[in-house]
Image (cartoon, grey):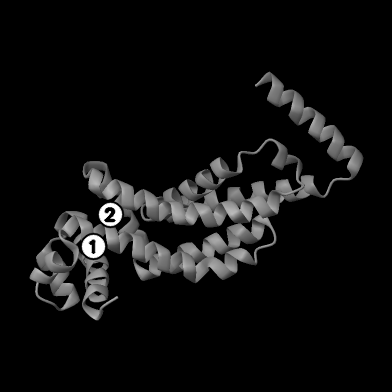
Amino acid sequence: MSDTKQRLLDGAMAAIREHGIAGVSARTIAAAAGVNQALVFYHYGSVDDLLAAACRANAAERVAHWSARLAGIGSLRELLAAGRALHQQERELGNVSVLAQLLAGAQADERLAAPTAGALQLWVDEIEAVLGRLLAGSPFAEIADVPGLARAVSAAFVGLELYDGVDRAGAERAMSALDQLALLIEIVDDLGPVARRALRAKIDRAVRRG
């Protein structure tokens, strides 16, 4: 990728952080990138196409940054601890506010919806791989929709990131509740074979009734 195209990607992210999605334009992006605004259209065709490319590139970069840590996670509580660290770092980098702006913009502009959803899917894929590995052999693995659970976890973290901006204590309490749930699942997994068979039978009955 040329230096100018990369500067435009970085400039688009910087413009969202500074001006919000409503204030992003070829002019504000070019100013942040330190280039002529005509280069936005020369390299990307439109502001929306540049924003879509910047969204995908930023998400891919951040997922790659966290991929090794996620691959080394050995328990649900470790996953939540990584989520806390991820949340803190991404907020400090301004990526939480960028995500909030992209999600808001996607509600009104369908051209932003697909790239924003694609960026979130990169995180879902990483979390799904971790959950599939952690839940293998667990009683919950037999009833859990792991792809759906990965989306629920991702959505929960996105919601908590946004919630944190208006009620940090409430977001922290929600994270603590998730910690308790992870601990409960680990306790169940440590049950002996007799207790696990009994639990599995109860789960099976509950699923059939549901």
Separation of disc 2 and disc 1 at Cα? 7 Å
Task: Give the labeled residue for mark 2.
Answer: 101
Q: Which amino acid does label 2 sit on?
A: Gln
Tell me the element at label 2. helix
Residue 202: x and y in percent read: 78, 28
Query: Picture quarter containing residue 201?
Result: top right
Q: In the image, is 162 to the left or to the right of 200?
A: left
Please report the residue visible at 47 percent of the width from the left and 64 percent of the height from the top: 63
Residue at left 69%, top 19%?
209
Question: Residue placed farthest to the top in the image?
Answer: 209
Taking 52 as reference, is 58 left or right? right
Q: Which of 193 and 172 is in front in this view?
A: 193
Crowdedness near tag 2: few (<14), some (14–19) or many (≥20) residues, C-alpha within 10 Å: some
Residue plotted at (85% across, 33% down): 198
Label 1 packing within 10 angstroms: few (<14), some (14-19), many (20+)? many
Residue highlighted by disc 1: 16
Mark 1 and mark 2 in contact (Cβ < 8 Å)?
A: yes
Q: How many labels does the image show?
A: 2
Name above or below for residue 34 compared with residue 140.
below
Residue at 59 percent across and 48 percent down: it is: 177
Residue 185: give x, y in percent of width and height: 72, 46
Label 1's element?
Answer: helix
Can you say whether 22 is above or below 34 in the image?
Answer: above
Residue 187 on image: x %, y %: 78, 48
Tell whether 60 sits left or right of 189: left
The three-letter amino acid code for the residue at tag 1 is Ile
The quadrant of the image that shows the N terminus is bottom left
The percent position of residue 96, horizontal first and vertical second, equals 37, 60
